[in-house]
Each structure stands twice: as C-alpha cells, then as structure tokens.
Image (cartoon, grey):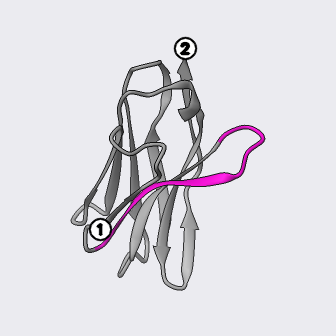
Amino acid sequence: VQLQASGGGLVQAGGSLRLSCAASGSIFSINRMGWYRQAPGKQRDRVADITSGGITYYADSVKGRFTISRDNAKNTVVLQMNSLNADDTAVYYCNALQLPRTYWGPGTQVTVSS
C-alpha cells in the first residue's frame, strides 16, 4: 500500500485546511485510514480515523473541529480541519491499517499562525 497525502500549509488561527490521503497498490481490505500528527519535540499522536465500515475516531483535542470522511471508491480519506489553533501546528501523517500491517504516508506540514 502506498499513501499519498496532499493539503496542509500555513493558515491563520481560526482558519481551515483540508488534508487528503489517497491509497494505491494492494488496497484490498484496508481496515482503517486516518491521520496522526507530530509536533516538534513531541510524540506522534492519533488525530482521527475512519474504518471501512464508517466508524470514526477523533482525539478529544479535535472533536467538534475536525471531520474525517472516506471515499471507498477512490480509496481516499479527507480530513477537514476547522477552527485551527496554534496547538494544531504539526506534521500530519496519513496512516492505513491493513491487518496485520500499518502503512504511513509522507508527512505534510500544517502551521497555524496566531
């Protein structure tokens, strides 16, 4: 499985960004896709993901602000991020779980200026 992310960039606090992740390769039975993020000097944290059945997960810090959606036909996951704040600044990594393996895409930088 190969993951290609797009989106990210620089935005002012209160603004919005949209991240997309497209999966290719042996994509049969990808169980879950989503996003992690890693701020400088911190561990990589789970942000949001969605299962093949549509069950979603959101970290408490993003609930009500971020929305994840999945287009199974296009093997794409989209993370809509609203009301961004400085704490959202991080490198965001697309993630795919295809048991028993986990795949990672290249990181994309999200910077929120205050």
Q: Nearer the viewer, residue 12 or 65?
A: 65
Dot 1 crowding, Cα within 10 Å, few <14, some 14–19, many 20+: few
* Label 1 to label 2: alpha-carbon separation: 33 Å
Q: Residue 4 shows which numbered tag?
A: none
| Marks 1 and 2 in Cβ contact (< 8 Å) | no
Q: Residue at x 34, y 55 (%)?
A: 77
When asked about the image quadrant of residue 33, the answer is bottom left
| Residues in magenta, as a range | 39-52
Residue furthest to the bottom: 100
Describe the element under mark 1 as helix, strand or loop: loop
What amino acid does circle 2 point to?
Answer: Ser
**Is 49 part of what is drawn in magenta?**
yes
From the top left corner, tell me how far across and down residue 78 is, in percent: 33, 49
Q: Residue 55 shows which numbered tag?
A: 1
What amino acid does circle 1 point to?
Answer: Ile
Dot 2 crowding, Cα within 10 Å, few <14, some 14–19, many 20+: few
Q: Residue at x 33, y 41 (%)?
A: 64
Describe the element under mark 2 as helix, strand or loop: loop
Q: Residue 114 shows which numbered tag?
A: 2
Q: Is residue 9 above or below residue 107?
A: above
Q: Nearer the viewer, residue 103 or 51?
A: 51
Q: Is residue 104 above or below residue 36?
A: below
From the top left corner, tell me how far across and down residue 93 is, in percent: 55, 51
Q: Residue at x 35, y 80 (%)?
A: 28
Q: Is residue 46 above or below residue 38?
A: below
**Is 59 part of what is drawn in magenta?**
no
